[in-house]
Amino acid sequence: MLALAGTVRAFVRHRGLLLRLTGVLVTLVLLLASAAAAVNAHYGYYPTLGQALGRTSPDASSLEAAEDRRGRVPDHGSVVAVQLPAPRSGFDARPAQVYLPPAWFARDRPTLPVVMLLHGTPGSPTDWVEGGEAPATADAWAARHGGRAPVLVMPDVNGTLTGDTECVDSDRGRVETYLTEDVPAAVVAMTGAQPPGRRWAVAGLSEGGTCAMVLALRHPDLFTAFGQYSGLVGPRAGDTNSGVAETVAELFGGSEAAFRAHEPPDLLAAAGDRYRHLGGWFEVGADDAEPLAAAEQLAPLARQAQIDTCLVVVPGGQHTFAVWRAAFRSSLPFLAARLGMVRQTAAMTGSCAAPS
């Protein structure tokens, strides 16, 4: 508003074309900055000005530099950017982010479990580092547990900022293969973490939340728990729980059978005792209509399929990083217990009134 008022004043008091053009340019720049700030204020992506300006975290590092620090256990973990090879999927992924907890730096390094965190669309692997503040959450957990926390792996799921693969193998990329074969193999080799199975969990926000649940249901041998934060009922080409025909056409080559093989209600209905070792944490904002409807449909089905299930609805919560930051904080004790890091207690289910 101040820039706009100044421009009007310049038009009134000055006739120079250059001054007028400069005033218009400054006004446009500040109006765009104001719009960006308003969007950020709604979604809560950059909590600090430093992050918005691209300031690197003091704990950021490379894997080689992290290895050089082995033997000197820090107070905080470190985030490294790594290019995960994709020999089986061929997926052209952006570099992943990996959080290494303080205990990882010990000379006698423990073999740590893994939580794979998936971003949404539009988005990138850094979303969980910046807007999601996952390293800070893991650091807080590690500080209470002798420096031990899960390794957090934040891989690319879309290839581009605005891509939308829904983490399935399709013409948009063989992303399911990438996440279930290439990523685990690379992470274990690079970090020395425990292999997939009872010591791996997967969680995600928005599209990534849907992906997390689908991956866990389709590959229960690879994961012991999932976190579904504001996801839809299943993979969708659009932003609603409907649009099945569009999804079948665009993501599954017109195959209804392939779609059903990735649809959580169908997978849960045919579960038998396949999922009895799984834990599932649903968290969603009360004012986030489509994901709320999905969580309220899926959580009872998960309980019926013998999944240890928690559903948290955040009062006034929307489709924002404020909800997703809180979701990871509240679910981390539950995930860590499923990973065998601590004993599971009723208190770990947070605001879940009656966990199964």
Image: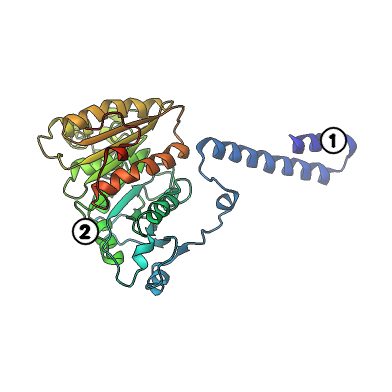
The answer to which of 26 and 130 lies nearer the viewer is 130
Height in image: 210 above or below 112?
above
Kindly give the residue lying farthest to the left in the view shown: 272
Height in image: 238 above or below 52?
above
> How many other residues sit within 10 Å of disc 2, few (<14), some (14-19) or many (≥20)?
some
Picture quarter with the N terminus? top right
Q: Quadrant of residue 191?
A: bottom left
Residue type indicated by callout 1: Arg
Query: Tags 1 and 2 in contact by the CB under 8 Å rule?
Result: no
Picture quarter with the C terminus? top left
Q: Which residue is mark 1?
A: 9
Helix, strand or loop at label 2? It is loop
Helix, strand or loop at label 1? It is helix
Q: Quadrant of residue 256?
A: top left
Height in image: 140 above or below 356?
below
Nearer the camera: disc 1 or disc 2: 2
Q: How many marks?
A: 2
The answer to which of 275 and 267 lies nearer the viewer is 275
> How many other residues sit within 10 Å of disc 1, few (<14), some (14-19) or many (≥20)?
few
What distance separates the C-alpha of mark 1 from that of mark 2?
66 Å
Of marks 1 and 2, which one's residue comes earlier in the chain?
Answer: 1
Residue type indicated by callout 2: Pro
Q: Which mark is residue 101?
A: none
Residue 279 locus on image (x, y percent): 23, 40
Q: Which residue is mark 2?
A: 195
Height in image: 67 above or below 94?
below
Q: Residue at x 39, y 71 (%)?
A: 64
The answer to which of 227 and 6 lies nearer the viewer is 227
Q: Does the rendering let one see residue 4?
A: yes
In the drawing, does residue 245 fall left or right of residue 25? left
